[in-house]
Image (spheres, grey):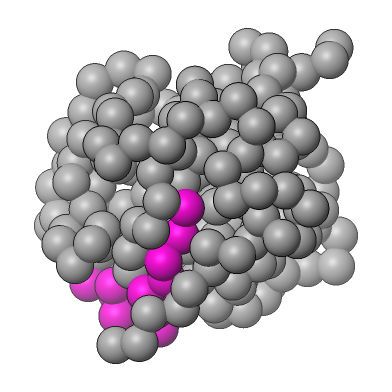
Amino acid sequence: MDVIDTTSIHEEFDGDRLPPGQRRTEQFPVLSKSGVPEWDMETWEFTVTGAVDTDLSLSWSAFTDLPRETQRQDFHCVTGWSRFDNEFAGVPFPALAERAGVRDDAVHVLFRSLDGYSTDLPLEECLREEVLFTFELDGQPLPSEHGGPLRVVTPHKYAYKGAKWVTGVEFLTEPKRGYWEQRGYSTVANPWEEERYSSW
């Protein structure tokens, strides 16, 4: 499978590949709000609800049968490290949105996770090909400590906008703050503007 290179995304934001305040690392530190949740492939379910034409409920096999691609992405953690040239394979957000049919009144998307985590992004920020529901990293199944079986990656945002262990999305008609956003983190999360924390 061809690899789509998205590592020039920083040019869109008039910034260097390594955003300000970040340090590059070859490691992949593990950070989460709590421990790694348990899951069972037989009962795992991914749901799409809210302002859509068709609610979806997908098993693991049904989800991984969706159209997939592999992207080379950079990964920027709000705590100050960046890891370049990650190869993530998975389902692009627009493909899932098209399958559900997004209503005209949808403006935001709330991601939900197995461990109770949530995060919110404007719909227009999600409808980018680089927003990927990924289940493979560098040719291997996504490790559980990094959000496996499924996580979201958002290379144009700090990584807390990419929920680990994601199990569903809700299309919203108004914004709703997620876990870290409720605790003072930025709702925008632009690495090239160092928007780490909220101004409110």
Residue in the image at 65% along x and 32% along y: 20
Relative to 147, is 8 on the left or the right?
Answer: right
The image shows residue 109, relative to residue 146, as above or below, that is: below
Relative to 192, is 82 on the left or the right?
Answer: left
Q: Along the line of sight, which residue is nearer the eye, 73 or 65? A: 73
Q: Where is residue 92 in the image (x, y as percent from the top left)?
A: 50, 71
Q: Where is residue 35 in the image (x, y as percent from the top left)?
A: 24, 20
From this viewpoint, is residue 160 visible?
no
Residue in the image at 79% along x and 53% along y: 14
How many badges with numbers are in the image?
0
Q: Along the line of sight, which residue is nearer the eye, 162 or 10? A: 10
**Range of residues picked out in magenta:** 61-74
The image shows residue 46, relative to residue 37, as above or below, that is: below
> Where, quadrant-wise, is the N terminus in this rendering?
bottom left
> Where, quadrant-wise, is the C terminus in this rendering?
top right
Residue in the image at 34% along x and 24% along y: 31
Q: Along the line of sight, which residue is nearer the eye, 44 or 195? A: 195
Residue in the image at 35% along x and 87% along y: 2
The image shows residue 37, relative to residue 5, as above or below, that is: above
From this viewpoint, is residue 23 visible?
yes
**Residue 173 in magenta?**
no
Q: Position of residue 119 (x, y in %)?
A: 58, 35
**Residue 63 in magenta?**
yes
Quadrant in the rendering for residue 45: bottom left
Relative to 175, is 76 on the left or the right?
Answer: left
The image shows residue 159, relative to residue 179, as above or below, that is: below
